[in-house]
Image (cartoon, grey):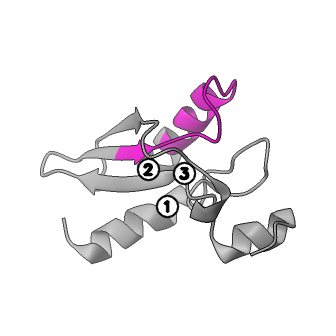
Amino acid sequence: MDEATKEYLMGALENVIDPELGIDIVNLGLVYDVDLDENGVCTVTMTLTAMGCPLAGHIEQDIKYALGDLPEVKETVTNIVWNPPWDKDKMSRYAKIALGIPD
């Protein structure tokens, strides 16, 4: 997968908003990787802000909707990982400003 395709997929994932924080999962730094294979299977490797997040299923469903609108994507797999652990340093400057977190 080329870099342009990766940016295209990440752009679609910016439409997935974390319902608790009101910021998209890309700017929150939750998405670690996205890959699209030759069969149209898109794998999103991501984490959550905390283990046991009650909205994990909601976020996963929103990922399927966001990527499902793209003609190249035939199937979406969300791979939730805990290593490396998420922390506020993974957030974009935009997310930090929106949440009032000092840079």
Q: Which kind of residue does numbered mark 1 sit on? A: Ala
Calculate the distance from the C-alpha at mark 2 to the C-alpha at mark 1.
Answer: 6 Å
Residue designated by label 3: 30
Q: Which kind of residue does numbered mark 3 sit on? A: Leu
The answer to whether residue 57 of the structure is visible from this angle is yes
Q: Nearer the viewer, mark 1 or mark 3?
A: 3
Residue farthest left in this picture = 38
Q: Secondary structure at mark 1?
A: helix
Label 2–label 1 contact, CB within 8 A: yes
The picture quadrant where one finds residue 57 is: top right
Kindly identify the residue that appears in the image at 60 percent across and 28 percent down.
51
Instruction: Work out whether mark 2 precedes mark 3 in sequence or the reverse, and give the earlier one.
Output: 3
Q: Secondary structure at mark 3?
A: loop
- Name the disc covering residue 12, or none: 1
| Within-10-Å neighbours for mark 3: few <14, some 14–19, many 20+ | many
Residue designated by label 2: 67
For the image shown, how many numbered marks are present on the structure?
3
Kindly identify the residue that appears in the image at 63 percent across and 23 percent down.
52
Position in image of residue 50 (x %, y %): 65, 34
Magenta residues, start to end? 44-63
In the image: residue 82, left or right of residue 74: right
Calculate the distance from the C-alpha at mark 2 to the C-alpha at mark 3.
Answer: 16 Å
The stretch drawn in magenta includes residue 24 = no
Q: Which kind of residue does numbered mark 2 sit on? A: Leu
The stretch drawn in magenta includes residue 59 = yes
Instruction: Work out whether mark 1 precedes mark 3 in sequence or the reverse, and give the earlier one.
Output: 1
Q: Tell which of 41 and 30 is nearer to you.
A: 30
Q: Which quadrant: the N terminus?
A: bottom left
- Name the disc covering residue 71, or none: none
Picture layout, residue 35 above or below residue 83: below
